Image (tube, grey):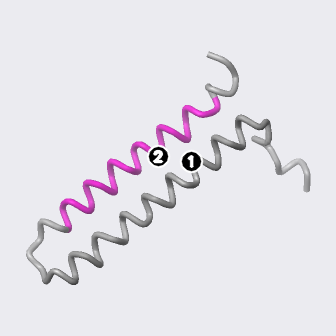
Amino acid sequence: MNAHQKKMIAPVVITVLLSAYMFTYCFVLLSVPMPVWAKVLVGLIPLALLGASVAVLIQRIKEIRSGEEDDLGQY
């Protein structure tokens, strides 16, 4: 396993755990009896957060592969 793969483990694990939490949260909230419009609204919020976290993961993986993992030194 090279250095780039080791640096990708933590973001992937965190995203997987967050995804599991969001799916569970969405499933539990959708199983509660409420109007359909409320279920849609409550279901879209966790799914939007999940989509954002996957987008951030993809961006982070691209940064790690390009060697820009520590860009704070530039400032």
In magenta segment, residue 23 = yes
The residue range painted magenta reads: 7-29
Residue 22: quadrant of the picture: bottom left
From the viewer's perspective, is 59 left or right of 27?
right
Q: Which residue is mark 1?
A: 57
Q: Which residue is mark 2?
A: 15
From the viewer's perspective, is 10 left or right of 51?
right
**Numbered disc 2: secondary structure:** helix
Q: Earlier in the sequence, mark 1 or mark 2?
A: 2
Query: Taking 5 as reference, is 47 above or below it?
Result: below
Q: 43 or 18, which lies in front?
A: 43
Residue 21, label in figure? none
Q: Amino acid at mark 2?
A: Thr
- Name the outermost residue toward the right: 74
Crowd tier of the residue under label 1, counting other residues whose Cα lies within 10 Å: few below 14, some 14–19, many 20 or above: some
The Cα–Cα distance between marks 1 and 2, rounded to whole angstroms, is 7 Å
Dots 1, 2 in contact, CB < 8 A: yes
- Name the outermost residue toward the left: 33
